[in-house]
Image (spheres, helix red, strand yellow):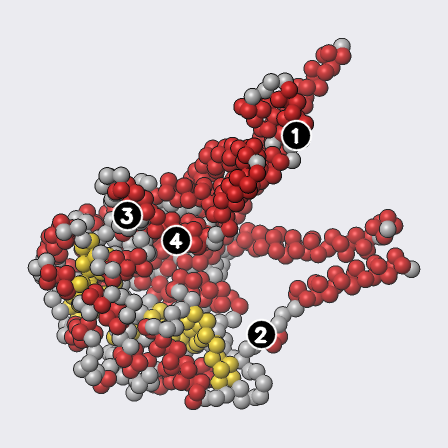
């Protein structure tokens, strides 16, 4: 009897253990309605983990305002940095996506995501009064259907330390050769000419796009598109642009070990005054407001764009700019209406665009001219000036123009070609075969 | 109690949780990996079965072979540098005794306690060519101090040093425990016979440590093949693919390049290599033992005859 009792007890424990392991937490599963029928929980999945400064702060401000105005709505935010975000995004796509998500309006990201049916289609007519800049929705449109909205207009920028330039009588280069001779002069002073995040690959891919755009002007998008669709990168302009990139690294334009250093390290070299220039995008315009940066650097940060290349077709006012990051709504969201309502609230011209402007996070994808107070930092004014006077823009950088296999390949191989461990021809062959 | 354990229901209840865990957490994912390895699944949406296409591509993928070569390189580094050092340090610690023994044991184990993320960033700063500790030390000694430790040619060595340093404490601790379990009577007998420290180490410590060495070396080889997190945080395989490791390459293909099917094919090849490494290592150690036993029993038989 005792034996049977013990056996039954052990079996019972086993069953309970297994049941506990296999059960799902029903309270959490939907996450969309808790309590009364009017209560809605929206899940926002963001690639902006810093909620205290920059774009993350702007996003959080809008979320807080929305919850204040809609007391029945609770918004839960999950924020990860870009790489971790993209990995988890993929995991979510298999088991249920949060309601509002960060997305990128670029083929390398959007094509696969839309093909997998992850994103809900948005009604284009809802946004006619949202003052989106002409063409900014194109990257988020797939087969004439809109799947997301752009957050920024990103401009490739060369930030420089004005005081350092003035003290050393360095001139802003008018063409690429001047940039390389400037690098020599700066190196001679024991300063790093240009801080570059070469470890991540994408900033150098933008740099390559920038050179290519200066070489070919408005033809660059077609050259890239043709090369990717045919898997053939033998176009002479692509060869020349890559050679120029290598030449720049050889001329010690970038810091020693640039090909293994990350974004933070490169940025620190510039903000600590160890580098005279920093290559990144307009999203770093908030550096001029960041009190963690020493005042003598912070107040002297200015910007110029890629100088003209010898024999290039681009005008001095042609810039490398694109609409990259933005937001979309999950196709399988159980509260899709509320999610779209929140998305539209974010994009009301006096929200994302205005707050972004006030917090110096760079150019929005919407017209911001009415929010200019005249009290913006000099850096912001300069960037606005560059965008307002732009005669043409490049569009999506080369690494984001193809499938993600191509993106991974070019971002890894670009380090090797710039540091000379791979030849230009091998580099172009390798990225070409990644497209096939 | 004996009768209780012969009850099949009880046996089943005791075995089943472990069995289920093995089936659902290990066996099923491996089977799924094998299946997805035959597909062009991107990780999202639909997919089609492509047969051995992924494996064919893998055979010509230079980045994969570079990553595998680096993993094997690390395994050799573990076996030839980390473990001999760990055994010697463990033996010295054992002889040290007193407070010193406890102190150094803790000191050597500290890197294992620190999070991998902290370790990676610590070494990133140590290696930094502009403000890193290493270059500053070189400068302090009158050198130029402008070495790019993560250049294509030297990056793999820089990464190996970090990995060997990081895993050293763990290996040392296991060897130390093994040495502590050796009967002291043997050392006393050796001392009476006039054996010096070196002879004692090679004739008593090392032979009796063989089972520990076998486990430790097998674990080291497997961990070298599985190496991912430190490399991911330190160089992410770069510059180019010069510090690419198999597990990191698998992650990049499956999750960054949206090639889940291909990533799984790498995973399958990876499992086969890990299993093969384990079997080979077991054979290497087993054969020697068996050979020795056979030799000894042969001698005994000769003497008896």
Numbered disc in front, either 2 or 4: 4
Q: Quadrant of residue A316?
A: bottom left
User: Left or right: B230 with respect to A172?
Assistant: right
Of residues B244 and B128, the one nearer the viewer is B128
Going 62% across and 22% down the picture, which residue do you hit? Answer: B191
| Secondary structure of the residue carrying numbered label 3 | loop
Residue A211, can we see it? no
Instruction: State the image coordinates of residue A70 (x, y, percent, origin top left).
Output: 45, 88
Chain ID, mark 3? B
The verdict on a common chain for dots 4 and 3 is yes
User: Left or right: A257 with respect to A64?
Assistant: left
Chain ID, mark 2? A
Chain ID, mark 1? B
The verdict on a common chain for dots 2 and 4 is no
Residues tagged 4 and 3 counted as in contact (Cβ below 8 A): no
Q: Is residue A128 above or below residue B30?
A: below
Numbered disc in front, either 1 or 3: 1
| Secondary structure of the residue carrying numbered label 2 | helix
Q: Which mark is residue A29?
A: 2
Cα gap from disc 2 to disc 4, whole angstroms: 37 Å
Cα gap from disc 1 to disc 4, whole angstroms: 43 Å
Numbered disc in front, either 2 or 1: 1
Query: Tag 4 or tag 1, which sits nearer the N-term?
Result: 4
Q: Which mark is residue B129?
A: 3
Q: Which mark is residue B184?
A: 1
Circle 4 is placed at which residue position? B121
* Label 1 packing within 10 angstroms: few (<14), some (14-19), many (20+): few
Cα gap from disc 2 to disc 1, whole angstroms: 60 Å
């Amino acid at each position: 009897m005792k034996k049977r009792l013990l056996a039954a007890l052990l079996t019972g424990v086993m069953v309970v253990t297994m049941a506990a392991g296999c059960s799902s937490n029903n309270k959490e599963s939907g996450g969309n309605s808790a309590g009364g029928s009017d209560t809605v929980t929206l899940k926002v999945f963001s690639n902006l983990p810093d909620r205290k400064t920059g774009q993350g702060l702007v996003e959080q401000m809008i979320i807080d305002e929305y919850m204040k105005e809609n007391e029945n709505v609770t918004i839960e935010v999950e924020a990860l940095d870009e790489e971790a975000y993209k990995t988890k995004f993929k995991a979510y796509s298999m088991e249920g996506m949060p309601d509002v998500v960060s997305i990128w309006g670029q083929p390398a990201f959007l094509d696969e995501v839309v093909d997998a049916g992850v994103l809900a289609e948005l009604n284009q007519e809802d946004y006619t009064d949202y003052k989106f800049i002409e063409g900014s929705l194109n990257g988020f449109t797939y087969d004439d259907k809109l799947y997301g909205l752009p957050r920024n207009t990103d401009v490739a920028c060369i930030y420089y330390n004005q005081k350092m330039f003035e003290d050393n009588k360095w001139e802003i280069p008018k063409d690429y050769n001047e940039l390389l001779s400037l690098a020599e002069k700066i190196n001679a002073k024991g300063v790093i000419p240009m801080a570059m995040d070469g470890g991540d690959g994408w900033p150098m891919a933008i740099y390559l796009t920038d050179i290519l755009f200066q070489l070919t002007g408005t033809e660059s998008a077609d050259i890239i598109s043709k090369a990717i669709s045919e898997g053939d990168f033998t176009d002479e302009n692509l060869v020349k642009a890559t050679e120029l990139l290598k030449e720049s690294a050889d001329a010690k334009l970038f810091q020693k070990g640039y090909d293994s250093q990350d974004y933070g390290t490169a940025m620190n070299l510039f903000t600590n005054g160890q580098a005279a220039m920093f290559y990144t995008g307009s999203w770093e315009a908030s550096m001029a407001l960041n009190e963690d940066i020493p005042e003598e650097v912070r107040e002297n940060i200015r910007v110029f764009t890629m100088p003209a290349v010898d024999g290039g077709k681009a005008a001095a006012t042609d810039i490398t700019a694109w609409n990259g990051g933005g937001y979309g709504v999950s196709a399988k969201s159980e509260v899709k209406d509320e999610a779209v309502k929140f998305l539209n609230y974010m994009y009301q011209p006096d929200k994302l665009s205005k707050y972004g402007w006030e917090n110096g996070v760079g150019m929005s994808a919407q017209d911001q001219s009415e929010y200019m107070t005249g009290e913006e930092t000099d850096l912001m004014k300069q960037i606005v000036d560059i965008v307002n006077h732009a005669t043409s823009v490049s569009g999506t950088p080369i690494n984001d123009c193809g499938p993600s296999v191509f993106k991974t390949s070019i971002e890894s191989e670009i380090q090797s070609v710039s540091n000379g461990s791979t030849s230009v021809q091998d580099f172009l062959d390798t990225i070409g075969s990644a497209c096939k | 109690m004996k009768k209780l354990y012969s009850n099949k229901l009880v046996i089943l209840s005791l075995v089943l949780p472990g069995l289920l865990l093995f089936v659902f957490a290990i066996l099923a994912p491996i089977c799924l990996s094998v299946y997805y390895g035959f597909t062009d699944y991107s990780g999202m949406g639909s997919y089609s079965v492509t047969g051995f296409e992924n494996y064919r591509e893998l055979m010509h993928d230079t980045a994969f072979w570079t990553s595998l070569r680096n993993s094997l390189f690390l395994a050799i580094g573990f076996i030839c540098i980390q473990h001999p050092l760990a055994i010697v340090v463990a033996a010295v610690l054992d002889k040290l005794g007193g407070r010193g023994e406890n102190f150094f044991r803790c000191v050597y184990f500290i890197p294992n306690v620190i999070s991998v993320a902290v370790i990676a960033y610590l070494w990133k700063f140590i290696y930094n060519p502009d403000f890193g500790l290493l270059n500053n030390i070189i400068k302090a000694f009158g050198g130029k101090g402008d070495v790019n430790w993560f250049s294509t040619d030297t990056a793999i060595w820089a990464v190996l040093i970090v990995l060997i340093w990081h895993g050293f404490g763990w290996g040392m601790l296991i060897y130390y425990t093994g040495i502590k379990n050796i009967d002291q009577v043997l050392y006393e007998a050796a001392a009476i016979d006039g054996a010096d420290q070196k002879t004692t180490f090679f004739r008593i410590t090392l032979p009796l440590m063989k089972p520990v060495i076998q486990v430790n070396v097998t674990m080291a080889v497997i961990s070298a093949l599985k190496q991912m997190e430190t490399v991911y945080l330190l160089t992410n395989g770069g510059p180019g693919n010069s510090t690419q490791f198999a597990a990191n390459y698998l992650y990049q293909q499956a999750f960054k390049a949206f090639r889940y099917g291909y990533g799984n094919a790498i995973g399958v090849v990876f499992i086969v290599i890990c299993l093969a490494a384990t079997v080979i290592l077991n054979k290497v150690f087993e054969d020697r033992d068996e050979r020795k036993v056979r030799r000894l029993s042969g001698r005994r038989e000769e003497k008896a005859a």
